[in-house]
Amino acid sequence: MGRRHHTSPEVHLNLNVRGLKESATLAINERCAAMQADGREVFRMGLGQSPFPVPTPVVEALKANAHQKDYLPVRGLPALRESVAEFHRRKDGLDFSGDDILVGPGSKELMFLLQLVYYGDLVIPTPSWVSYAPQAHIIGRQIRWVPTRADNGWRMTPDELAQLCQEDPTRPRIFIFNYPSNPTGGTYRVEELRAIARVAREFRIVLLSDEIYGEINHCGRHVSVARYYPEGTIVSGGLSKWCGAGGWRVGTFAFPRSLRWLLDAMAVAASETFTSTAAPIQYAAVRAFEGGLRIEQYLSHSRRILRTLGKSCARRLRAAGLDLINPKGGFYLFPSFEPHREALRARGIRSSVELCHALLEETGVAVLPGEVFGRAPEELTVRLAFVDFDGSQALAQSDVIGLRSELDDTYLESCCGKVTRAIDRICEWVGATHPAAV
Ligand SMILES: Cc1ncc(COP(=O)(O)O)c(C=O)c1O
């Protein structure tokens, strides 16, 4: 008898993704859809998607390039690689040329290829973005989590990284460092970046700096760690977050010359898997990375909206007794419900998964459990994406107000009302759990 191709348990044993669950994000989405079908109001704060539209000049460039039909070079369209290098020179003061750039169908895919071609442990802080660890798991790499603490704003310290590396100083490692952070919204100061870079250099770590939220640092002051460890840092970016183009699937890696061999190896793997990123998208992406006044204005408004909304949500959640930092970039909050542990336990809530489940069923607010970001299951943390609003309307209204004045509560109520109502519901729910808190 030949091999069976049914769903028998023996065949499952051959699966390389054994033990991996479908992403928690998808499960929450399905539950949201079911609740909405039942006529219940749902606040979609689970999925980390930009609320803003793709800037008009970039959409126009895509329209003008709809006819592009040829396969493109595996490393990316030369004009796009040039424009990404120029973007990093202009924005980050980093000295890249087009030859240093690799373009892929999303930075997520590039991260997977990097882990595939480089034989090393994956080092990531906890909490970290949901997909790094499952990718390492699929490929069969060891995962080493570096702890962080709430009272340090979930920032990783260089000492903790050094401690881990000292166990086996010459072991090959990829350290993925993401800031502004998904899930915490936090970022790092220049002195901290320098200190982390020193440790990375000492242990010759391949540092993958995931700066996909860099352009939406809320004050427009993102600094790349590649400035302090240029020879060992790959800068990861793309259009998914700052350009509102997650569904376009375009991501970029920028390599130092000393790591060109890694770029070459990834290009080999890419040529046997995705071949190249969609041609019309790459032509349009050239326009996005070129920037200019209209795109800078779009970014200034996006940052201001996210800054005002993020701060307001954080302030109100803190007033309800939750523990969290003000976000410094991106569109996430990572509140801890630990201060309400006893009261929540009395209601049968003992883990972040149970917490998210209860929040969704009782308030209609969908958030993700801290557990999927690498936190201990019993820790009562969640990630909340404050993106459930109409980004086009919010940008248009912000434009009417002008960049000189601040946005106020009236603006937030009228343009981001769903988010503010979701926060109200969480605060009321916590208050009902623990009346002294509100
Ligand atoms: C921290 C982080 N890195 C990488 C990605 C992947 O982005 P993309 O594959 O769309 O470039 C995401 C998307 O959610 C993210 O949050």
Image (cartoon, rainbow, N blue to C red):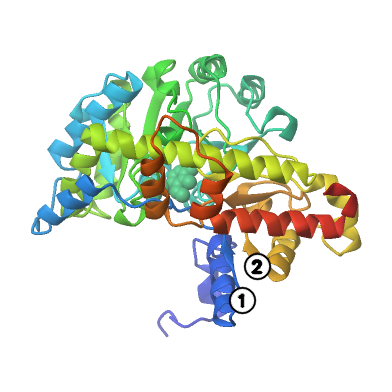
Q: Please provide percent x and percent y for residue 31.
A: 59, 73
Q: Which mark is residue 40?
A: 1
Q: Secondary structure at mark 1?
A: loop
Q: Is residue 335 left or right of residue 282?
A: right
Q: Please provide percent x and percent y for residue 414.
A: 51, 54
**Label 1 to label 2: alpha-carbon separation:** 7 Å
- The reply to whether dot 1 and dot 2 touch (C-beta < 8 Å) is yes
Residue at 34% x, 49% y is: 106
Residue nearest the viewer, comparing 205 with 81: 81
Residue at 50% x, 34% y is: 406
Residue at 34% x, 57% y is: 247
Residue nearest the viewer, comparing 235 with 216: 216
Q: Residues within 10 Å of mark 1 (few under 14, many from 20)?
A: some
The residue identified by callout 2 is: 364
Q: Is residue 2 left or right of residue 182?
A: left
Three-letter code for the amino acid on which mark 2 is drawn? Gly
Q: Residues within 10 Å of mark 2 (few under 14, many from 20)?
A: many
